[in-house]
Amino acid sequence: MRRTFQDAASKNAAARDRLDRELGPLPVWDLSALYAGMDAPAVRRDLDAAEAEAIAFENAYKGRLEGLARGKSAGADLADALVRYEKLEDLLGRLASFAGLVYAGDTTDPVRAKFYGDIQEKITAISSHLLFFTLELNRIDDGLIDQAMAEPRLGHYRPWLEDIRKDKPFQLEDRVEQLFHEKSVTGRAAWNRLFDETIAGLRFEIDGEKLPLEPTLNLLQDTAEEKRRAAAEALAATFKDNLRTFSLITNTLAKDKEIADRWRGFEDVADSRHLANRVEREVVDALVAAVREAYPRLSHRYYRLKARWFGKDVLPHWDRNAPLPKVEQRTIAWTDARDTVLSAYAGFSPKLSNIAKRFFDESWIDAPVRPGKAPGAFAHPTVPSAHPFVLLNYQGKPRDVMTLAHELGHGVHQVLAAPNGALMAPTPLTLAETASVFGEMLTFKAILTGTTDPVQKKALLASKVEDMINTVVRQIAFYSYERKIHIARKDGELTADDISAAWMSVQGESLGPAIELKPGYETFWAYIPHFIHSPFYVYAYAFGDCLVNSLYAVYEKADKGFAERYLAMLAAGGTKHHSEVLAPFGLDARDPAFWQGGLGVIERLIGELEAMEE
């Protein structure tokens, strides 16, 4: 048995070496645009400067904003305060971004973990001196604020001022807000960190070799069913061994959120997320209802078709994302992925492509898979005075190319929105997914147009349908699961079996009868980071996908001005509500037909695949 394991390990090592050669050199980001390193003198200098300025700001303005708003130079005085506040937010954001990115590079490194924790604690302490500012601004009479905004410098901040006033009904007394703020570092942030470090430290045994999470998940897309099954079973075994920890994290964070929601007066478990996203509950409810009603026409229908391609009545869950049988699979080199995405972007807008190219040319991307590195992918906006960074775990799969297109979409969006400044550059999550999903669509369409082989074309269409199902159906199922967990948690702590049962119920409903959820799949809720870091974030993906489907339909029929309108939408950052940014395209997310239009795109692609069978 030992020799078998050694042989398997040797083969796996050879396979990794071959993969490295096929991928070619992968970029590692250069964080020096933020700081030269963890021990750079500039880190301590900026921490000290931020602390001194925060204390000075508090001494200058705390308890005085109401009086300034009633003064003769109200607009100018409040504008001066906002300019100082924004500069501080940028400086603190620079420090926090650097610490977070360093930590993401290896969450198992105790030196990085300590640096990240220390910076978090210091920033929490510093920002406690600034907490009064938005609370006091929201106590000023609306009429006084409106009058003061006649001053152009203050008027510039109108979108931000109007935005924070939406939080007013849910604000608490100052000392309670201070307590919530300071306790966050030992509360939610600490549990988030425990999750990250636990996930990064897990190993999954396959053929005698212990792999981190990302390479194990990657095997679920392998051409060999035995490898897919082995990966799924390894995931289930390791998750099961750690369910007590994951259950405790889930219970604690759900209770933490329930306490905060109760104190603030939120009625529904997801209302705080809707407020943060600046989207109405009824809009999200309409999206969820439309997607759930469409499950039979989308995921159920597609997986029946996929099962037939595999010569089966049902597919085990480890075959859900399997590549199509008898379709040649090749590893996509990094340079090919880069050229594919940049070319697709250029076909839509040279400006879009030129911005994306900077990520490659200026070392803004970290692509290799490494032990301890944060799993998945993200685009971090950092702060407007710097630039975004993209993290990937690139392994040469077609889906990795789409992930690159997706994260570059975020990155370009963040670059375009940065001139709005630290307060108004951030985009609500519902709109933040627009550029990323649109980037995927541009890339997919470009690849499809250049593909003439019918077998490869079928594989491309199938891959796109699966991506859309994962983005729309799967994310709404995730949202339904989160609702079940957070509602049930109000009545007491949930066992691992309770959590797993909620997971299985929504997965069975969304995937349909053609996917067989084998024993072990009940544990797969454990590794989803969005449940931990950003409760109810997930519906933003479905929102973005349906929005982009509708937006792309407008693009295909539009005149030459579409690209300019699209770039202007991205450049708006957080200065406009979703209804305002969609209006130039004739779209309205409050219209139920809007969601049906987006879902109809997926249905038509499934129809094309079915027609290929005839």
Image (tube, grey):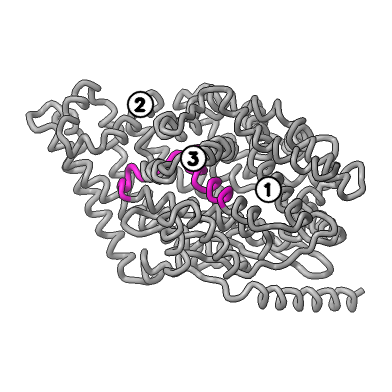
Q: Residue at x 63, y 70 (%)?
A: 333
Quadrant in which the C terminus is drawn: top right
Q: CA distance from mark 1 to mark 3?
A: 22 Å
Residue under numbered circle 2:
168
Q: Are marks 1 and 3 in contact (CB under 8 Å)?
A: no
In the rendered view, would you say 15 is above or below 228? below
- Indicate the secondary structure of the residue bearing disc 3: helix
Q: Nearer the viewer, residue 554 or 154?
A: 554
Q: Residue at x 64, y 58 (%)?
A: 450
- On the question of residue 256 being in view, the answer is no
Asked if residue 423 is among those painted magenta in the image, a careful observer would answer yes
Marks 3, 2: nearer the viewer: 3
In the rendering, at what x and y percent does residue 157 appear? 26, 37
Asked if residue 424 is among those painted magenta in the image, a careful observer would answer yes
Marks 1, 2: nearer the viewer: 1
Q: Which mark is residue 429?
A: 3
- Indicate the secondary structure of the residue bearing disc 1: helix
Q: Nearer the viewer, residue 329 or 321?
A: 329
Q: Nearer the viewer, residue 479 or 173?
A: 479
- Indicate the secondary structure of the residue bearing disc 2: helix
Residues drawn in magenta: 419-442
Q: Which mark is residue 464?
A: 1
In the rendering, at what x and y percent does residue 461 appear? 71, 48
Direction from residue 492 to residue 281 in the image, left or right? left
Q: Residue at x 46, y 54 (%)?
A: 411
Of labels 1 and 2, earlier in sequence is: 2
In the rendered view, would you say 603 is above or below 188? above
